[in-house]
Image (cartoon, rainbow, N blue to C red):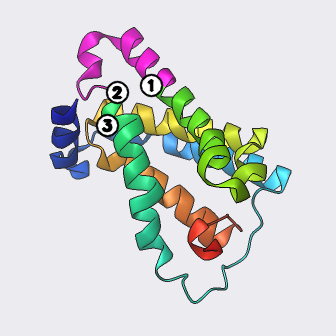
Amino acid sequence: MADDLTQALLHSPFKTPLKAWVLVPMFAIIAVSVGLSTGLFRPGWLDSPLAPLLPFILFLFPSLLEEAFFRGVLIPRNILASGRVKATWRVVISTLLFVAWHPFNAMAFNPTAIPLFLDPWFLVIVGAMGLTCGYAYALSRSIWVPVIIHWAAVTVWVLFLGGRNLVLEL
């Protein structure tokens, strides 16, 4: 597993087949539709002196750390060699654990996140992101592809859509 993650970290996202990115527009449509219709997304610029630093912070956590575990560790890098059915199951299991991580994280470590991380609509968005990132990882074999997808989604949410950010709550 560690070797898989190391190889995934060394594999350039620029060598990724276009089909690895195919679910990104669908994820964006789901996330924006659910987020706007439920009030999870509130358009507007984040007014904070820390706003310029947040993209860098969000790159490390949650994007890189969560993707390294939920995709890089839980999904073997060459999973497609085992067949599409096995690959699909690994992506689904990784996604279910990714979704379950959010309520667990809130209840165990981050009580101020409980209302958001237990919101079923938020978890729908998290599930869509998990499937998108898992699919992208399986096809690209590069951890950087799901990291970029996760980072872009969280950064847009925090900076432009009223998303919650732990850094600003400290």
Location of residue 147 in the rendering, given as x and y in whole percent from the top left corner = 38, 51
CB under 8 Å between callouts 3 and 2?
A: yes
SS label for mark 1: helix
The residue singled out by tag 1 in the image is 91
SS label for mark 3: helix
Q: Quadrant of the C terminus?
A: bottom right
The stretch in magenta equals 76-93
Cα–Cα span, label 1 and label 3: 11 Å
The residue singled out by tag 2 in the image is 75
Which quadrant of the figure has residue 88? top left
How many other residues sit within 10 Å of disc 3, few (<14), some (14-19) or many (≥20)? many
Amino acid type shown at disc 2 = Ile
Residue drawn at x 73%, y 76% is: 44
The residue singled out by tag 3 in the image is 72
Please give left or right for residue 58 compared with residue 160 in the image.
Answer: left
Residue drawn at x 37%, y 53% is: 64
Q: Is residue 99 above or below residue 157?
A: above
Location of residue 91 in the rendering, given as x and y in whole percent from the top left corner = 44, 25
